[in-house]
Amino acid sequence: MEDPRPLKLSQETALAGSLEKKLRPLLDTRRELDIRFLGSAPPAFQYQVIKCRALLWEGNPEMRVRFEQNLIREYMDFRYYEELYRQAFARRLKEGVFGRRPQIRSQTS
């Protein structure tokens, strides 16, 4: 069952900062440490975390499995539109029109 009292952003930030300070001395300091709460992270970041299995802690394995299943389904649906956006972005860069408003052609009768 999900916790009905999610953390506020300020609480997440404070807790992540505290965990980072405690974990940094235990880890290789040449690597970047980024602690985030998956529930409030962007979908692409969430997907990369579960894809790479960089799990440090889980409170409820069944909830994690449900979270992963929902995330994968939502991410795969989103990926189609993300790819369309990337293709349009690359096309506008190639055409040299990125950052300009597209010309709207008026239809004349």
Image (cartoon, rainbow, N blue to C red):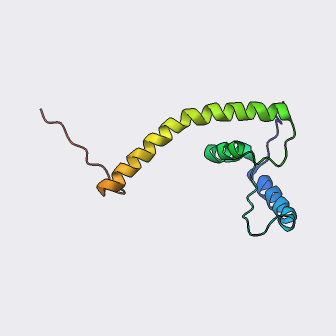
Q: Position of residue 96 (x, y in %)?
A: 30, 58
Q: Position of residue 39 (x, y in %)?
A: 73, 42
Left or right side of 81 for 7: right
Is the C terminus in the top left, top right, bottom left or bottom right quadrant?
A: top left
Is the N terminus in the top left, top right, bottom left or bottom right quadrant?
A: top right
Rendering quarter of residue 61: top right
Left or right side of 21 for 78: left
Q: Position of residue 104 (x, y in %)?
A: 25, 44
Question: Who's the residue at 74% across and 45% down the image?
Answer: 53
Rendering quarter of residue 85: top left
Question: Who's the residue at 61% across and 45% down the image?
Answer: 44
Q: How many marks?
A: 0
Q: Position of residue 47 (x, y in %)?
A: 65, 42
Question: Who's the residue at 60% across and 37% down the image?
Answer: 75
Question: Who's the residue at 18% across and 36% down the image?
Answer: 107
Q: Nearer the viewer, residue 73 or 11?
A: 73
